[in-house]
Image (tube, helix red, strand yellow):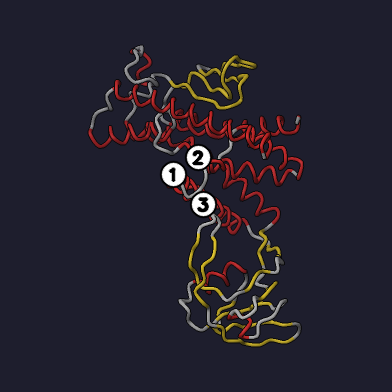
Amino acid sequence: MSTNIFSFVIVLGILIFFHELGHFLVARLFGVGVEKFSLGFGPKLFSKKIGITDYCISAIPLGGYVKMTGEEPGAEVDPADIPFSFTHKHVFKRILIVAAGPFFNFFLAVIIFFGIFQISGTFILKPSIGTVQEDAPAYKAGLENGDLITAIDGSAIESWEEMAKIISESNGKSLAVSVRRGESSDVMHVTPELKTTKNIFGEDVERYAIGIASSGDVYSKDLNPFQAFSESMVQTYKISELTVISIVKLLQGSISTKTLGGPIMIAQMAGQQAREGVANLVFFIALLSINLGIINFLPIPVLDGGHLVFFFVEAATGRPVNIKIREIAQQAGIVALVLLMAYVFYNDIARIFFS
C-alpha cells in the first residue's frame, strides 16, 4: 500500500511539474508575470518566493497550477502591471502559453523514450512462426512452426510487424515468401485469404492473413542518438494515435466506460510498475504523460483545450469571447469534470470490491 501511495505521488508530481513548467517557461518567454507556481492544491506544505513568483508544494497532489498576472479576463490590472499581464498579450501568445502545458507532457514522453532507446536499444519481434493453422494458406504452402521469414517478394523482412503489414496490404495477391528452416532456405508461394479477426478494441475487422502466429522471439537492436530520437518520436506518435482512437471509441460506445480509471487505479498501477523495476515505472510515466497531454487538449472548458477554443474564436473574430459566456462554459466544464471524477472513483472502488 505504501509503495502504491509513494509511487502515485512521484508519478503525479513529475507529470504535473512538466505540465506546469511548460506554461511557466513560455509565459516568462513572452514577458508574462507569474505570481505562483504550485504543485498540488490546498494548504501549502512548502513555499519559497523568488522575485514575484511564489513556488510552492501543496497538500493535495491531484493537480497544480501557474497563476499569471492579469490571467482572469475582465479583472482589474494595475497600470504598472499591464506589460506583464497575460490578458493584455496578443492572442497568439496566449495560445502558445496555454498549449505549452500539454506539449510539455508530450516532450516528457519523448525524453523518456529517448533515454530508454539510447540505453537499452529497441526490442524487435522476430518474423518467426510459432504456430500454423491447419488448412490455412501458410499450411497449404508448406510453412511450419519454427520457420523464420526473411523476405517477401524479394524485400528483406526484419520484424513481425513489417511482415504482417505486407500480408494485410496484399489484397489477396500471391506472395513469394523466403523462409529459413534450420540451415536451409526456401521460397514458398502463399496467397493470403480475407479473414474476420478482432482488433485490440475487440471489434470485428476484415484483413488478409495467412494463418500463422508469432513464436514470441525477440532480438535487441542498438540505436545511435539520431535513431533513438526518431524512434522516441514514432513511439510517442503511435501511443498518442491509439489514445485518441480510444477516446473516440469511448464516445461512440464501442469501448465500455467501465475501462476508465481514476487516481486509485493509477496508484495501483504505479505501485505495480515500481515493484517490477525503475524502467517499468519510467515507461508508465511516459504513457500517462501522453494521456495527460491529450486529455488537456480536449475542448472542455476549465481544461487547456477549452481555453484554446476561446482564444481561437477570438483570433477568428477579432474580439474576446463574452465574459458571461465564458463563465457559464467554465461552470459547465467544472460540473462535467466533477461528474467524470465521481464516475472514475466509482469504477476504481467497484474494481476493488466487486472484481
Q: Position of residue 293 (x, y in %)?
A: 50, 40
Q: Position of residue 106 (x, y in %)?
A: 52, 43
Sooner in the amino-acid sequence: mark 2 or mark 3: 3
Image quarter in which the N terminus is found: top right
Q: Residue at x 58, y 53 (%)?
A: 232
Q: Which mark is residue 242?
A: 3
Q: Position of residue 327 (x, y in %)?
A: 34, 21
* Alpha carbon distance from label 2 to label 3: 13 Å
* Alpha carbon distance from label 2 to label 1: 18 Å
Q: Amino acid at mark 1?
A: Leu
Q: Amino acid at mark 3?
A: Leu
Picture quadrant of residue 216: bottom right
Picture quadrant of residue 16: top right
Image quarter in which the C terminus is found: top right
- Disc 2 element: helix
Q: In the displayed structure, does residue 10 sit left or right of residue 333?
A: right
Nearer the observer: mark 3 or 1; the answer is: 1
Q: In the displayed structure, does residue 105 sit left or right of residue 84?
A: right
- Disc 1 element: helix
Callout 3 environment at 10 Å: few (<14), some (14 to 19), or many (20+)?
few
Nearer the observer: mark 2 or 3; the answer is: 3
Q: Position of residue 194 (x, y in %)?
A: 49, 74
- Position of residue 18 relative to residue 248, above or below, is above
- Position of residue 297 relative to residue 323, above or below, is below
Q: In the displayed structure, does residue 207 sit left or right of residue 350?
A: left
State the residue position of label 1.
251
Instruction: For the residues labelled 2 and 3, say whether their Cβ atoms are less than 8 Å apart.
Output: no
State the residue position of label 2.
293
Q: Amino acid at mark 2?
A: Gly
Sooner in the amino-acid sequence: mark 2 or mark 1: 1
